[in-house]
Image (cartoon, rainbow, N blue to C red):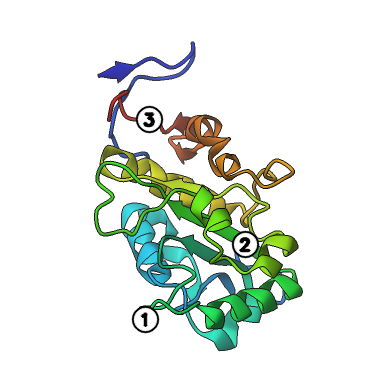
Amino acid sequence: AERLLPPGGEVRIDGEATSSAPPPLPPSEGHTHHLYCSRLNEGAEALVVEMLAARDPLSQLRWTCSPDDADRCDAMLVYLTARTWVTESGAPNEAFAEELRRTMERGTRLVLAHEMPGRGQEGRAAVEFGAFLSDGRTPTDLIAKGVYALVAVPLKGGAWRETSMALLEAAVREGGRGTAAAQGGEGAACCERWSELVGGVWSHGGGQRKPLLAPASGV
């Protein structure tokens, strides 16, 4: 199905790839990388690789998985799945929690990305966001420090995956800025800007803004 943009816009086909965006700006002064993703955060590295493959303009993104470079990165990715806070043995993932504590103490910006349950999410350990607050696995001190204070990028599967990668690209480009979650940390806050973000993701192509439209309803 086609969807019409407001006057002055253009017709887009659901699922059509967006145009190339300009390369990211260099890392901020004193930093060597845009993004750090921890290998202690299962799946984080693979998610960055997936994003780069889907959003080719980010091939110039400077990212690292080396803990030695973590303090020289503009932002850190926090990939939220059912495996984030537990190890393969089922024990608490205290090593990742401690790394995240150090990151927050340095004041490094966080980019949260949350795998949401739904169609096409098989194998991604998707989980409802509320579980991070209710299952007792997220260390309480990190919750108190505001680890969930920013709206997480919602990651969906199927026809929504391309949109999800574009949203993640936008979050990385913007240095992890986001809207603060509602006071009280309700789980639903992670997705409160979903419609706004979908409408706001765009890339430059031929000097025009090109919004990335959502798939047809029901997808």
Q: CA distance from mark 3 to mark 2?
A: 25 Å
Q: Amino acid at mark 3?
A: Ala
Could you say where residue 176 lies in the image, as x and y percent from the top left? 61, 55
- Which residue is at 64% across, 47% downward? 178
Could you say where residue 64 lies in the image, as x and y percent from the top left? 49, 77
Q: CA distance from mark 1 to mark 3?
A: 38 Å
C-beta proximity under 8 Å, tags 2 and 1: no
Disc 3: which residue:
214
Outermost residue on the front side: it is 135
Q: Nearer the viewer, residue 131 or 203?
A: 131
Q: Nearer the viewer, residue 175 or 90?
A: 90
Q: Earlier in the sequence, mark 2 or mark 1?
A: 1
Could you say where residue 154 lies in the image, as x and y percent from the top left? 46, 46
Classify residue 93 as left or right of residue 54.
right
User: What is the secondary structure assignment of the residue under circle 3?
Assistant: loop
Q: Amino acid at mark 1?
A: Ser
Outermost residue on the top side: it is 7
Could you say where residue 49 lies in the image, as x and y percent from the top left? 35, 66
Outermost residue on the bottom side: it is 68
- Which residue is at 29% across, 18% downward? 2
C-beta proximity under 8 Å, tags 1 and 3: no
